[in-house]
Image (spheres, rainbow, N blue to C red):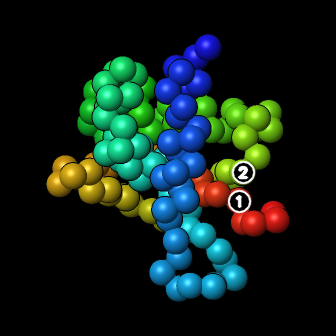
Amino acid sequence: MSVWEDHSIEDRVTAILSEVHAHQSGHHFGRPYLTAYQLAIAFARSSPEIVRTLGYQVGGEGTGEHVSLAQYLARELSRRIKTQTITHIEGAFLSPNDVRKIEFNNEGQIIRSSLTSANNDLSMFRLRPEGG
């Protein structure tokens, strides 16, 4: 088994994504996406023991780390969505076109996306719409 299975990471990610609701109830766009950074922040908040086991920081510009929790979650989700191991979560990209910076609040610590300054797409995930 892998760390992913050993710690039921898919179930934990699903629980996080299930808590995300549109501010405008019933909108035809459906449930909002969370970026990999937002997902990593929520995951670190809800499962600090697993984050310690993994040994990753949440991520962001200036961490000095080449692999982060955000990257790990995005990579594993993307791989499992592609192989259809996961079918209830969908991914998308936010283009970095004309984006200068994106910052996230991690328990009072500001995390700046390293992807936008590197002109890379920002991965996002959400639960698939019912029946979709």
State the residue position of label 1: 128
Mark 1 falls on what kind of element?
Answer: loop
State the residue position of label 2: 88
Q: Which residue is drawn at 17% across and 54% down?
A: 108
Residue 131 position within the rendered picture, expressed as x and y whole percent measured from the top left: 82, 65
Numbered mark located on residue 47 in the image: none
**Mark 1 to mark 2: distance in Å?**
5 Å
State left or right for residue 62 relative to residue 11.
Answer: left
For the question of whether residue 59 can be seen, the reply is: no
Q: Which residue is drawn at 53% across and 56% down?
A: 17
Mark 2 falls on what kind of element?
Answer: loop
Q: Mark 1 or mark 2, which has the lower sequence index?
A: 2
Q: Do the residues labelled 1 and 2 touch (CB within 8 Å)?
A: yes
Q: What residue type is labelled 1?
A: Arg
Q: Which of 88 and 78 is in front in this view?
A: 88
- Quarter of the figure that contains the C terminus: bottom right
Q: Which of 20 and 90 is in front in this view?
A: 20
